[in-house]
Image (spheres, helix red, strand yellow):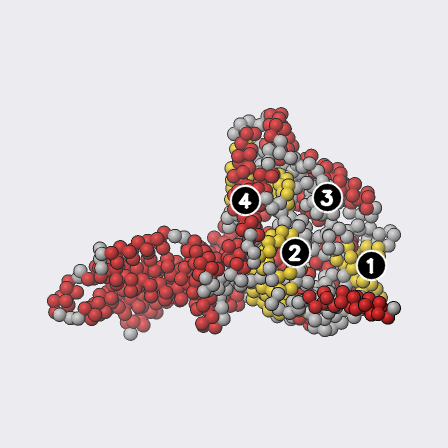
Amino acid sequence: MAGLQYVLKRLALMIPTFVLVMIIIFLLVRLLPGDPAIAIAGDKASDADLAAIREKLGLNDPLLVQFWLFFTNTLQGDLGRSIMMRTSVSDVIIDRLPTTGFLALFAVSLSLMIAGPLAFVAALNRGKWPDTVIRTVFQVGLSMPVFYIGLILLTFLAAKLRWFPVGGSGDGFWGQIHYLFLPAMTVALYTSAIIMRNLRAAIIEVLDADYVQFARAKGLPNRLILGRHVLRNALISTITLLGLSIGNLMSGTLVTETVFAVPGLGRLMLEAIFARDYPLIQGLTLTFAVLVSIVFLLTDLFQSLLDPRMRLT
Amino acid sequence: MTRTLMAAVLAATTALVTPAMAQERGGTMNFARYDGSRLIDPIYADRNPDIWMVGSLFDTLLRSSDDGKSIVGGLAESFEVSEDGKTVTLTLQSGLKFADGSALEADDVLFSLDRARNGDLGPWSGMLGSVSDVTADGNAITVSLSQPDPTILSMLATFNTAIVNKEVFEAAEGATDQEKSAAIFATASAGVGSGAFYMCGFEQGASMDFCANEHHWEMGADGKPLPYLDKVHFEIIPDDATRILKLQAGEVDAVEFVPFSRVAELDADPAINMNLYPSTRIIYSPINTRETRADGSANPLNDVRVRQAVNYATNKDALIGLVLQGAGQPMTAPLMSSSTRLASKLDLYSYDMDKAMALVKEAGIEAGTKVTLTTLAGSSDDATIFAALQQMWAPLGIELVVEQVDGATRGAKNRSGEFDIHTYGWVDDVNDPSQVTGWLGYSPVRNAVGTGWESDKFNALFEASGTEMDQAARAQQYADMQKIYADAAPLLFMYETPFAVAVSTAVDGYVQTPLGANIFSRATVSK
């Protein structure tokens, strides 16, 4: 019962967050320099054509009127029509969401698969050569820009060795695994470096904790100590970090999807910004806000499962 | 005698058959584009990625000749302009069909031209401003004009006058013309055009497919209808490096808009043909010629001598070397590319530092005079141009500073006059110099590309050229306009660039025209 109340409370807290996001994005989009009518009709359009476009889009209405329209339509599930796509914003987002969702989940899975075992190896060999090698390699990954890592992977693994396709998103589950491996790995290399550092530090801290020393003194097998006591406690802070990383990962898709020609939400956002497609920018930002909020909620729920002290907070 | 005749017949047959045997049909050409199409409708296409694809799906009554110098028949097998220049009579080919096999008739032509000149619909209606009426009698189409129009044949060869299927269009979903157009595009309807291809697949912003139109009227070298290809598959890959990697990995057969810094590398690749197609693309920089800047401060570029000085101080060959790796040429016609009809060939401010120094001295420019160059953020070409100009103009006492903005902001600044000088480019949409001349110099249209420059004499010449049917007299008017414009220097005249398209050696026959149109109808891909 307390758990359900906790979830409901968290869901209720999302409402003001979304309202705030709507206000901020509405104002920020309109603060962008440049006339959306020019972005739509092009530099060659006549002044009369631009005036007609502004009128049609309601850009001449007072800001409050425009916001109220956006707000009430959004509450009714209508995100408007994309100016550049000439179709419903919801349809465009629903069309692209699976690709970005798949890419994000794939990247997170790869991050955990890379970071988890290596963090354990590094922590259990603290100060020895495996620890130094792992930390150095990840430091290099962390210090390189995502687009650069992407281009290196593309050049060698796709263009030279032809193990993976250069771009696109593929069809079906295995098709997507094949096509999205390089973009997911590009993101994962960066994310796993952050997770590995955090998890290693947390494992070291837990290994030194009294209850672990007590378990050892009790004669519990090492496997049991690591699995039941060390991993569970070390994961608490790492899961928070993972949640935050997924939030960052969403913004990272702008670069990754462009470099790898993946037709997802990130690339769409970039196109929408350049085209000053107000409804699409607003719709995408709101979608990202919803996704990130859901991830944060799941993070908190998972944390409360691991740490009972958090359940009633 | 019989043997000789047989030999002749055999030789003739061989000559006719050989190209047919050599002509490979079928297959798919995979083409990587820098940006996707959003609506390929003749009258609504307003971005190059849309405009340049119209010709693959639709046909116009007339066409530009291969060299771009004259107009030839398209859907119309013959055409004639009356002596008073106020009537154009065209005769449609017989047996024309749309891609769904339905007949293309005079009714479709009337419908399409009425759409094209409807000022409430697309942005290009002004190009048919002289047309007062279009009528049909059987296969004969009569276009009546309110005044003589020397551009009318070019306009009937331009994408916005392409013929659409009236029946398909009217049956489409939607309450308005634009909604119907969007619905047809979204469902990739086969019957809307008569071009060499019809659209058979579309994923917004990701990919697009064109399939061969088996009813197309134009014949290939083998005597069968064009195109040779079964299909063209387009992938949208905005990133230059990724697009090129796709070609190098063999995943696509062609990539467009190759950065000039990569041209030499791709040219050296034996598996790739690096094509530089002649274009009407010019790169120039509008100069704000107003007396004061938008903030009210005095504008040094208001003085024509300063504008001439910066033109003389700009080493165009060096810029071409730096930005285009040599793959371009300095502008020689002040209002257009050298390949546009009626282009003058002038010595357009060849690099002369002595003249430049003398002009700024005469104009009284003080050392440290600040001028802002507005460039596109993220454009390596613009960054190179700025770095070069900053050094080239420093001896004049001009301190060039940079302001980086995105395309929409640059466009807004151009219209409002809130700039000193900014990078810009142009590609003709029409096979006639009137469009680019109106854009760059005729002040009532767009303040002479936002520069604020105004010349009554120039404007009068431009207006007169709009109804001048005597070709020699019109050529003289254009020569005069170009001279006036060159002397006034409202632009930093820079260079012309080709269209850089890299194709696999398996591809043959693909062409990009000087107006930018992608032509796949004679393309083949070796299997």
Q: Is residue B381 above or below residue A71?
A: above
Q: Residue B512: which disc?
A: 2
Q: Quadrant of residue B134?
A: bottom right
* Mark 3, residue position: B343
Residue B79 circle label: 1
Q: Residue at x 52, y 58 (%)?
A: B248
Which picture quadrant has residue B66? bottom right
Mark 2 or 4 closer to N-term?
4
Q: Residues within 10 Å of mark 4 (few under 14, many from 20)?
A: many
Write down the chain letter for disc 1.
B
Amino acid type of the residue tagged 1 in the rendering: Phe
For disc 4, the marked residue is B382
The one of B225 and A52 positioned closer to us in this rendering: B225
Q: Nearer the viewer, mark 2 or mark 1?
A: 2
Q: Which three-letter amino acid code belongs to the residue tagged 3?
A: Ala
Instruction: Please tell me in which quadrant of the rendered image residue A61 appears.
Output: bottom right
Identify the residue shown where x is 75% and y is 58%.
B63
Estimate the spatial distance between the alpha carbons at disc 1 and disc 3, rounded to whole Å: 26 Å
